[in-house]
Image (cartoon, grey):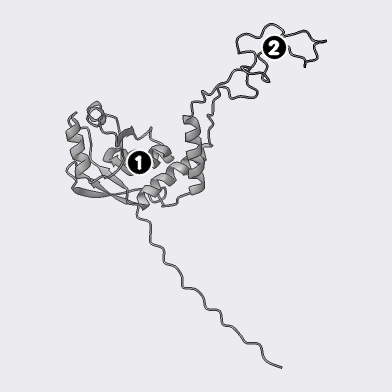
Amino acid sequence: MTKAKVVKKISAPKTIRNEFNSAIPVYDLNGKEIERYQLDKDIFGGKINKAVLYQAVVMYNARARQGNASTKTRGDVSGGGKKPWRQKGTGRARAGSTRSPLWRHGGSIFGPHPRDYHYDLPKKLKRVAFLSCINSKLAENKMIGIVDLSVVAPKTKNFRGVVTALKLNGKSLFVVDSVNQDVMRASRNMQEVAIKNYKDFNTMDVLNSDNLVISRSALDKLSGRFN
């Protein structure tokens, strides 16, 4: 009787996970790093929930739909008030109106009508989606801080100089503590730039941008969005 061979199990080496870095650089208007801002590790821990992000994107896209598609029923099409022929004796099928959906130039059956596609997600889900999109920018090193933008003169070339100094490529979302009219005038001709108040920007604003730039004062209040 042959002895069964004993196969020794070799345990796989443990994978080493790099600690998520929640510290972001803060630059001045000339593109020079002046400090590193440490975000709250209890909130910005690097967790990204893609399933909830998908639900949030579908919700925001549904809310953006106008829902203006409309068709006419047999009651909306003009004409057809007179019965085409008598009910019996002609040998033809019964007909009560020339605007029947079975007729040419008649109304539509079960056609689309104006409707509201708006719906909402629970607050906790929206909070998870919002946190996930910010963590994704942190993981990609696409989130930075900047000093106060209110000193920028209301000219496009001045704001473009700030974007060039920060070496930002693609669309950039600037989040500030309070929206300054001079900053809005300076950036309104730049299609790749969006200015938002820290209370107003949402998950889609972050996902639609390549870079997330938050002012130093807005960074101090960002954690309050998750309380």
**The residue under label 2 is which amino acid type?**
Ser
- Secondary structure of residue under mark 1: loop
**Number of the label disc, if any, that sits on residue 209:** 1
Quadrant containing the C terminus in the rendered view: top left
In which quadrant will I find the N terminus?
A: bottom right
Rendered image: mark on residue 154: none
The vertical placement of 122 against 169, above or below, is above
Task: Kindly identify the residue that appears in the image at 40 percent across and 48 percent down.
Answer: 135
Q: Which of 39 and 114 is in front in this view?
A: 114
* The quadrant where residue 157 appears: top left
Distance from the alpha carbon under mark 2 to that under mark 1: 55 Å
Residue under pointer 2: 97
How crowded pointer 2 is (Cα within 10 Å; few <14, some 14-19, many 20+) is rated as: some
**At which x and y percent is residue 58?**
50, 38
In the image, taking residue 184 as reference, residue 8 lies left or right, namely: right
User: Which secondary structure, mark 2?
Assistant: loop
Residue 198 at x, y percent in the picture? 35, 35
In this rendering, position of residue 153 left or right of residue 128: left
Residue 45 location, x and y as percent?
41, 52
Answer with left or right where residue 96 lies relative to residue 184.
Answer: right
Report the residue that reaches farthest toward the top: 82
